[in-house]
Amino acid sequence: MRSTILGFVAGAAFLQTRAALPAAWQIAACLCASLALLLALRGPVRATVAGALAGFAWAAIVAHLTLAPRLDKADEGRDIEIVGTVARLPHDFGQGVRFQFAVGQVMTTNAKVPPMLALSWYRAGSEALQLHPGERWRLTVRLQRPHGNANPHGFDYEAWLLGQGIRATGYVRTAPGNRRLDAFVVTPGHLVERCRDILRARILAALEGKPYAAVIVALVVGDQRGIEQPDWDVFNRTGVSHLVAISGLHITMVAGLAALALSFLWRRSFFTNAQLPLLLPAQKVAALSGACAALVYVLLAGFGVPAQRTLYMLAVVAAALWMGRLTSVTHILCLALGLVVLLDPWAVLWPGFWLSFGAVGVILYAGLGRLDESSAGWRATLALAARTQYAVTLGLVPLTLLLFSQVSLVGPIANAFAIPVVSFVVTPLALLGSLLPAPLAGPVLWCAHRVLEWLAAALGWLATLPLAVWSAPAPPPWLFVLALAGTGWMLAPRGWPHRWAGAAAWLPLFLLQPTHPAPGRFAVTAFDVGQGMALLVETSGHRLLYDTGPQYAPGQDAGGRVILPYLRARGIKHLDTVVVSHSDVDHVGGALTLLEALAVDRVSSSLGEGHRVVHAARRHERCVAGQRWEWDGVVFEMLQPAPASYADTELKANARSCTLRIEARGRALLLAGDIEAVQEAALVSQEPDKLRADVLLAPHHGSGTSSTPAFLEAVGPSIGIFQVGYRNRYRHPKKEVFERYGDLHIRRLRTDESGAITLDFGPQVGAEEYRRQYARYWYEP
């Protein structure tokens, strides 16, 4: 059975790497072959292959069914009137409310809308938006097909939407017909979500204005969306972010308390003479009550993967006890693993899946899940906890580096006191306070928050230590496997020869260095940041970032969401120069985040002296035409703006965009920011010989005020890059401008269609598109 389940998971995971789904006949062939193997052959290899074929086929069937409802292209961007219910817990993000909406009826004629939507409802001024799960609304919406930024080592928003069953996103339009039809539509799902909503509201009301109220909410109902990014940074640097989620330890604790309470009452027949243990053994009642309590808590927690894993393991143990069949721990773990993937084949895409099951697997492998019955007392318990922490910390290092490109060195110390404090003090108080009546709830929740404040202060101090985190590039597959083998050697049972020698397999992992272009060449990564600009330019010994992308919402920007994850995965901790072309938010939005997280030697920009980025920079200088420098055989030259432009207070920020030309061995790139026709004409007349380039970053995202024919003729590019957002409100690139590039036989690459674009400037200019190179079946063609 275990071999079959492991094969099933591997087959489902393999499907998630495919660019296209198999056809119906291929799925049927896999199912038939799986059944034939199970009937005809014996042995673990047969079981694994049969399971893999079944897992691949099952994941494909689920994917076909989920992808079937779709929004027609003709329905994108037009007003559609729908009736439905608020399906999940809404999230207030300051500018409005985000929520999932289950469509019950489409009122607009000839419009086809998928059954589940992700919507945003923006506030008009100080308007209050009150949405609650289970409410039935009539809304006018504008929708688009699922689309997210596609970057190496970035979060795959489209895959996440698919896993949630969401096949269109959009926003609520201001319309007179928007109104609530019913206060609550009774369904099991709505009941659960309304309970989560009530508990969250009670906590936030009792802890109004408290800095860690959102963490208390996360521990009670699993909603982590209110936690601020600085707090996440501390949790990640100290390796305790798993405690902020409703973890297996929390669920097991709740299940254990429920089991003990019901067992105590049952043995005493609820203090009556009913003699209930004669009707049903107390052990079975305890197992059932524990499993039910775990189910309720997991439902309130939002049904995350770690919570699912614990629930299924507890359910298997309870079922085994009821049936009088002892079940090994590995059987329980494999059954939980199979159930998670059976219900959600996309779970294998997320780090939480691998870390959750990986941690339990490490504990089992290291033999720390069994306590010698001869040893008892607090010393033995403490020793077991220490060995468990040691095994998990050591065992997850290769996986953590693969997933996050960093490991918390202070994690063992932080977890040593954070685990007991959160699990046995903060979480019980938070749960108790959220359930008690109003007069009693406030003091209990205040106590939970106060303890959490003390804990956060200690974690904050640990996070500031210079060696709190070790960062390294994401390892290639062969190096990861080598490190995993070394980890297995170190955690082998007692008596295994020279266990310490396994550490030698880690050396290549920690000595791995970021890759560089060869001397005299340079490489460029044009990130998919939506409607904005951000490009990383690399030589053999230096790195320059041109623009930093947009700000998406308060506390969320391209610097933290797109650029930093990429740099961390590459092992890049330092930038020589950041060029901020001008002050528009789609160019400067991520600058502050990057300056706080990275060592940046110099910022070159056209920003005013009072700008926050100028003050945050270690060293700042204005970009001015005529500036020139050379790195590793690559020449950088600033062509714009003119020095006199800074004295012109009437000049728009676009007109002062830093225009940078980069050249190596006859191959060149021109980064033109948001310059417009006037600046293009000035460059053509003043610097015609310096404009020629093989690749042009389309000025102003391909707006109608840029990319004039004379300018394009002077540059003469073979490739034009348009950094634009999908269905952006400016309608960039303009149709006539885009066609102008095509008429000149310029290869046109758009980040909204290609994802991130990687350019290699060698003897020839090579261009790779992320959505083509790493195509997945859920990407829209």
Image: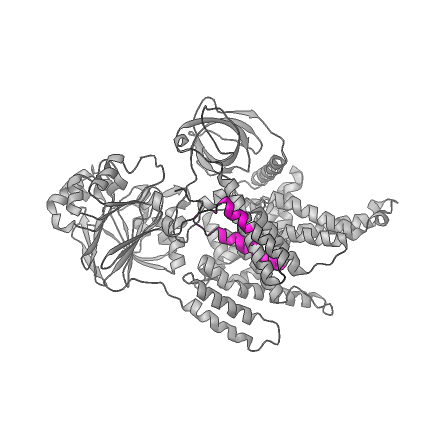
For residue 742: magenta? no
Residue 142 position, x and y percent, is 42, 30
Residue 376 position, x and y percent, is 72, 67
754, above or below 355, in the image: above
Q: In which quarter of the image is the N terminus?
A: bottom right
Depth check: give the residue in front, 80 or 631. 80
Question: Residue at position x 49%, y 34% from top?
Answer: 114
Depth check: give the residue in front, 595 or 205. 595
Depth check: give the residue in front, 579 or 54. 54
Question: Residue at position x 75%, y 49% from top?
Answer: 261
Horizontally, residue 404 falls left or right of residue 218, namely left
Which picture quadrant has residue 471?
A: bottom left
Which residue is at the far right?
A: 273
Residue stretch in magenta: 2-30
Horizontally, residue 755 falls left or right of residue 94, namely left
Residue 333 position, x and y percent, is 63, 57
Horizontally, residue 758 falls left or right of residue 202, namely left
Q: In which quarter of the image is the C terminus?
A: top left
Which residue is at the far bottom?
A: 497
666, above or below 200, in the image: below
The secondary structure making up most of the magenta span is helix
Residue 151 position, x and y percent, is 38, 50
Question: Residue at position x 65%, y 53% from top?
Answer: 313
